[in-house]
Amino acid sequence: MKKLLVSLFLMSQFLGAGLAQQQAVAPAKAPAVTAQTPSAESIWADLMEGNQRFVSGKTKAVDVVTLRNTLVKGQQPRVVVVACSDSRVSPEIVFDKNLGDIFVVESAGNVVGPIGVGSIEYAVEHLGSSVLVVLGHQGCGAVAAACSGEKMPSTNLQAIVDKILPAVTRAKGHAKADDVLEAAILENIHQSTEDILASSDVLQHFLHDGKLTVFEAIYELGSGKVVQLRPLSGDH
């Protein structure tokens, strides 16, 4: 009986020591890492670096197959770009970006209605986009049509022109006749930005809370350069 008790005692000591050793060597859990949202300035700088690569013809090579498979699980574009649907102005190309990098909203004349604004809201509120770029371009045909003063052949085309006309009116108020188109293109970029923000409480909220920054820019067809016009933040 005494031998049995001694054996049980030794076994309990052995098991207890083993358990303590396992607990001692068990790896501690790594602290959770919270991804910090890059500043609007750093996001814009990254876009400009990409544009410079595009201008110089030295764009990045990307393994699109691997990238495509990675993005099956979801998207987190940092940037929304509102651009003209002109085939010469593709945001992913002029900023040297790829799948998953930019949430693009395009229409002739870079004008945006309820569907476009809703798309921007979705990107900002649900995908975490913190920068909105309103991108116009030189030689915009939609703005030229608005400058002509002619009635468009369909109600849909007229709807585009009607959105641009306020910008044309402002341009004609200060530009020389030969410079009206160029001035109207710039005014239309400002107009598009104002229209987007004025029609969205969601975007105004993010802007005023410092969670969204808007950059206005113009694309030069010949050089390929994107030139910043002005940034807008919550204290604009």
Image (tube, rainbow, N blue to C red):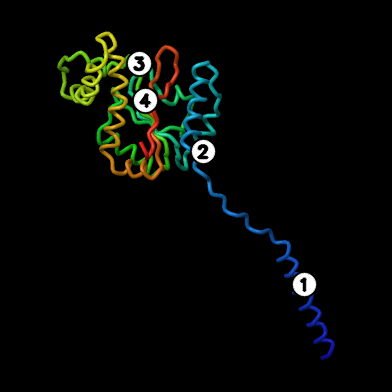
The amino acid type, in three-letter code, at marker 2 is: Thr
The residue pinned by badge 2 equals 70
Q: Residues within 10 Å of mark 4 (few under 14, many from 20)?
A: many
Quarter containing the C terminus: top left
Q: Residues within 10 Å of mark 3 (few under 14, many from 20)?
A: some
What's the CA distance linking mark 3 and mark 1?
A: 78 Å
What's the CA distance linking mark 2 and mark 1?
A: 46 Å
Q: Secondary structure at mark 3?
A: loop
Q: Earlier in the sequence, mark 3 or mark 1?
A: 1
Say which of marks 4 and 2 sits in front: 4
Relative horizontal placement of residue 47, taking residue 231 as reference (left or right)? right
What's the CA distance linking mark 3 and mark 4?
A: 10 Å
Q: Nearer the viewer, residue 54 or 6?
A: 54
The residue pinned by badge 1 equals 17
Residue 55 is situated, as x and y percent measured from the top left of the image, at: 49, 17
Q: Tell whether label 4 touches label 3 (CB within 8 Å).
A: no
Q: Tell whether label 3 touches label 2 (CB within 8 Å).
A: no
The amino acid type, in three-letter code, at marker 4 is: Leu
The amino acid type, in three-letter code, at marker 3 is: Gln
Rendered image: mark on residue 138: 3
Residue at 31% from the left image edge and 27% from the top image edge: 190
Say which of marks 3 and 1 sits in front: 3
What's the CA distance linking mark 1 and mark 4?
A: 68 Å
The picture quadrant where one finds residue 61 is: top right
What's the CA distance linking mark 2 and mark 3?
A: 36 Å
Q: Residues within 10 Å of mark 2 (few under 14, many from 20)?
A: few
What's the CA distance linking mark 4 and mark 2?
A: 28 Å
Q: Nearer the viewer, residue 11 or 176?
A: 176
